[in-house]
Image: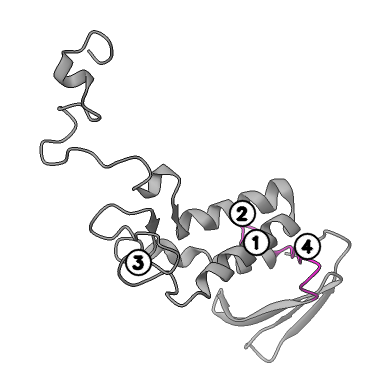
Amino acid sequence: MWGENAPPEERNSPVPPWWHFGWHGTPYGDQCQDGGAILYTSYFDLMVRLRYFGIENAWKRFGEILSRYRMPDRLCGGPPLFRGEIPQQENPGQVGVDLPFPESGLVPCFLLYGVLGVEATVDGLRIQPKLPAALPAFGVDGLHYRGNRLRVTATPREVVIEGNRRGRRMRKRLPPGGGII
C-alpha cells in the first residue's frame, strides 16, 4: 500500500521501489511531462486552439513558437539550450526537440492542415482556409493528390488550384468561412 500505511522507507521515498529497479526518479520539472514542451504536442495545441479559440489565437501561438525557434540554438544542440532549458535526449530534460522526437516536424503541418485547411476526404480534397488577419493570402506548391502535383493558393475570397495534368487551373469563389471539395 502507498501512503500513510506504507513502511517508513517507502513513505519517505519520492518513487515507490516497484517502479523501476534501475531508475530512482527524476525531480519534478526535469521531464517534458512536467510542464515542459515537445514540438509535436505543439502541433496538436495549435489545431485545438484553431478549432476552439479561432485562427487569431492559434496564429499568435504559432508566432511564439517561431520566435523561440529563431533563437541561436534553434532548439537543438547540447544542454543547456539558449534559455537554459535542458533538452531531453537520452537523459531527462524539459524540452523534447531532437534525438528521440523526429515527430517534432509536425509543427509546420499546422500551415497546411490548419491555415490552408487541407483535408483528404472520401469525396475528394477539401480545402477550407482559415487565414489570420496578418496573412492576406497563403499557398503551397508541390501538394500531391491522386497523381497530381498541385499548387494551392487561398485568400479570404477564393481558392486557386493549379494542377500538372494538362495545365488545369480551377478558381473557386468562397463564401465567408466556406471551403471547396
Q: How many neighbours does mark 1 have within 10 angstroms: few (below 14), some (14-19), or many (20 or more)?
A: many
Q: Residues within 10 Å of mark 4 (few under 14, many from 20)?
A: some
Q: Is residue 117 visible?
A: no
Q: Disc 1 marks which amino acid?
A: Gly
Q: Earlier in the sequence, mark 2 or mark 3?
A: 2
Label 4: which secondary element: loop
Marks 2 and 3, how far apart at CA: 22 Å
Which is nearer the N-term, disc 4 or disc 1?
A: 1
- Mark 2 or mark 4: which comes first in sequence? 2
Residue 49 in the image: x percent, y percent?
Answer: 66, 51
Residue at left offset 76%, top offset 67%: 131
147 or 139, nearer to the observer: 139
Asked whether disc 2 touches disc 1, contact meaning CB atoms under 8 Å apart, the reply is yes
Closest to the observer, 111 or 83: 83
Q: Which residues are magenta?
A: 118-136
Q: Residue at x 25, y 16 (%)?
A: 2
Question: Is residue 174 among the parts visible in the rendering?
Answer: yes
Mark drawn on residue 47: 2
Q: Look at 61% across and 68% down and name the residue there.
A: 112
Task: Name the amino acid type tagged 3.
Answer: Asp
Please name the residue that numbered disc 1 is placed on: 114
Q: Give the residue drawn at x 78%, y 62%.
A: 179
User: Is 12 drawn above or below residue 64 in the view shown?
Assistant: above
Q: Amino acid at mark 2?
A: Met
C-alpha gap between disc 2 and disc 4: 18 Å
- Mark 1: secondary structure: helix
Labels 3, 4: front one = 3
Mark on residue 93? none
